[in-house]
Image: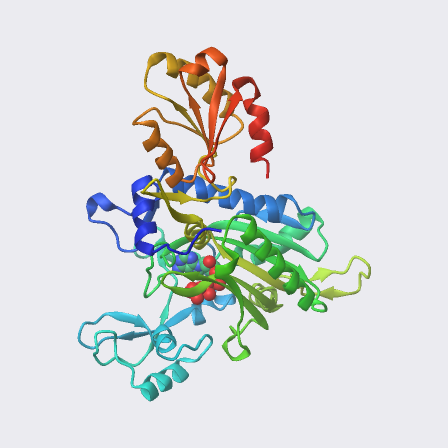
Amino acid sequence: MAETNVTMEKIVALAKQRGFVYPGSAIYGGLANSWDFGPLGAQMRMNIKTDWWKRFVESRPDMVGLDGAILMNPRVWEASGHVAGFSDPLVEDVKTHKRYRADHLIEEATGESVDGWSLDQIAGKLKELELKSPEGNALTEPKAFNLMFETAIGKTEESKANVYLRPETAQAIFVNFKHVLDSTRKRIPFGIAQIGKAFRNEITPGNFIFRTLEFEQMEIEYFIEEEGWEAHIEKWADDMEAWAESIGIDGDRLHRLEVPEESLAHYSKRTIDFEFAFPFGTKELWGLAYRTDFDLGNHQEHSGENLRYVDPNDNTRKIVPHVVEPSMGVDRTLLAVLLSAYDEEEVNGDKRVVMRFKPHMAPYQIAVLPLSKKEELQAGARPVFEALAPHWRVDYDETQSIGKRYRRQDEIGTPYCVTVDFDSLEDKAVTIRDRDTMEQVRVPIAELERWFAEKLSI
Ligand code: ATP
């Protein structure tokens, strides 16, 4: 695994320079904490989502997918508890008027989590610790700040209806539970997975793409009988960990945190946070919660619809299924993959930066490089690109010296470079350079597809 000599400065600079992540709206002076994904970042997000979907939906008979709408009837968010309770405790510096998460200030001061604490408990702790703002000024009393973004449907003031941008994808799954059950005939235990954007008006966004106002989630609601929930959550924890390893997240920097009972969200009986050692601290990467029958039960009550599941072995037995929820952020996953892959080494007195991505995560898997811009070399290299591109993600680069192009491909994590040189025109073979070992082998062009099929199959 790569070394841990990575800093956020290095990752942010490389991400911008090579086209993984750009600051949002930059030509207009930017928009704080908004980011745009460049050609390589867009591809990697796609790779993460495709791999997740393949692993957790396509490869499992007990899973199906869903793609719900971002805008939902506001009653959904009343039933889910978000209107009343999806808030963070906010304090304000009385001089600078800067806002802070009161829970984060306490956690930084004490090193202990205050997840799930009431506003009163937080207020009491702030007083007890006599906490000041990071600028050293007094703080206001904590206030609850709802994280949901509101917007309006309709053109005139009178006809406008307020709606929310969804703060999580999960609710579309609960709301469609009965539809999915009726249309697929699935029997519990089974799960519904969804990937999509979520929006939160975070008080203190930051740390690059770690905490943003707009992000993407990959969520699963796994419907089960109450009995045996412990085994299901354990199994999901193992599955999540195995996926982390398979996409190149450094296992040494990842660990499970058993959220203590007093810090559990009101709907959860057990929560495991997967924490990752980011350069700015060890923080939640993903969450896994046993949500009991809280969500379906609430939606049943608020909507008046029958959301019970009929036991196929005993038609008189009707239950509201319980739920285990693995919840993962695409953006935090990307950040953890970037940080895990970053490596530096010295080669002939020069620093070599290498992103040691797993081949199926890398933006490009192969780069085809004619040794120079000479017409005959390009004529030799194009067919190589065309033969490989239908099967793998292939870059084609004919600029700069070959040494510089190798370094560039190392920095964007391309596992293999294929160089077409003057000999290639004679011997119909190319040189393949391995990103990690830098070893080179000569392979006949006619055998390339077979060679890569072996190397790049996962
Ligand atoms: P945090 O405690 O960091 O605010 P959370 O516990 O509120 O996170 P969840 O509601 O469990 O997060 O959301 C599930 C996942 O969505 C998180 O594990 C994370 O990967 C991702 N996520 C949540 N909030 C954000 C955000 N503001 N920006 C980027 N990703 C996020």
How many numbered discs, if any? 0
Rendered position, 283 above or below 49: below
Asked if residue 188 lies left or right of residue 245, the reply is right
Where residue 210 sits: x, y (%)?
Answer: 38, 57
Q: Quadrant of residue 371?
A: top left
Residue located at (57% from left, 34% from top): 455
Residue occupying image coordinates x 43% and y 53%: 3
Name the residue furthest right: 313
The correct choice, above or below, for 178 with respect to 359 in the image is below
- Looking at the image, the residue that sits furthest to the left is 95
What percent of the width, then of the height, locates residue 213?
Answer: 36, 57
Looking at the picture, the colour scheme in use is rainbow
Q: Residue at x 69, y 68 (%)?
A: 226
Q: Quadrant of the C terminus?
A: top right
Residue 1, how many percent across, how many down?
Answer: 49, 51
In the image, is 59 to the left or to the right of 22? Answer: right
Is 249 in front, or is 162?
Answer: 249
Q: Nearer the viewer, residue 7 or 273?
A: 7
Residue 69 visible? The answer is: no
Query: Residue visible at 21% across and 43% down?
Result: 27
Up/down of 389 relative to 346, above or below: above
318 left or right of 5 in image: right
